[in-house]
Image (cartoon, rainbow, N blue to C red):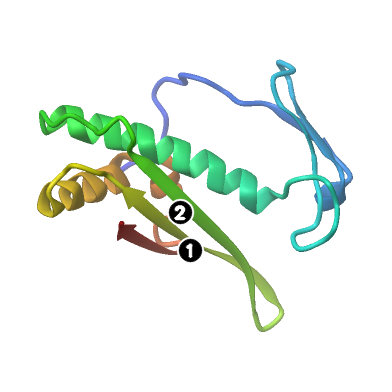
Amino acid sequence: MSNRIDKVIYTGRTHTTGGRSGQSRSSDGRLAVDLSVPGSNGAGTNPEQLFAAGWSACFLGALGKAAQAAKVDLPADAAVDAEVDLGLAGEAFFLAARLNVRLPGLDRPTAQSLLETAHQICPYSKATRGNIDVALELA
């Protein structure tokens, strides 16, 4: 399977200064966030929270595509709770993640099938596959 893009649909652009204690702004002005080191008393968010937010939103979109292909109605209150860990192994930093998926009203086999299909088609899941530990849970 090739990871080469044939057609760019969208490009997100940000400008970040100050690292984990800085600011990040999108080129279109729609995103403007202060950043803080995880676990600090700073008022800003951190890259792990931003990654969790992006991945969970994308994963919900992939669940919608999976449901559409399976001719199943995705519950209106479907939700993904994403947890992204920043950790150490020796002196090296790594990420790990958990996606906790809630699909109320669907029977467990159908919900599990949608979750697995979404994990195969979600671009964030593809980008992390084989690179970080990821746990998928059906709530």
> Can you say whether 74 is above or below 87 in the image?
above
Which residue shows up at 41% across the image and 55% down it? 99
Residue 22 drawn at (x, y percent): 87, 44
- Which quadrant does the C terminus fall into? bottom left
Which amino acid, by three-letter code, is at mark 1?
A: Ile
Q: Which picture quadrant has residue 37?
A: bottom right
* Res 3 seen here: no
Of 131 and 116, the residue lying toward us: 116
Relative to 27, 7 lies left or right: left
Residue 108 drawn at (x, y percent): 15, 54
Q: Report helix, strand or loop for mark 2.
A: helix
Residue 55 drawn at (x, y percent): 48, 43
For disc 1, the marked residue is 132
For disc 2, the marked residue is 128
Which residue ends up furthest to the bottom in the rendered image? 90
Residue 131 drawn at (x, y percent): 47, 61
Which residue shows up at 40% across the image and 48% down it? 125
Which amino acid, by three-letter code, is at mark 2?
A: Thr
* Res 135 seen here: yes
Q: How many numbered tags mark residues here?
A: 2
Relative to 129, 23 lies left or right: right
The reply to whether the C-beta atoms of the residues labelled 1 and 2 are less than 8 Å apart is yes
Q: Report helix, strand or loop for mark 1.
A: loop
Which residue shows up at 54% across the image and 48% down it? 52
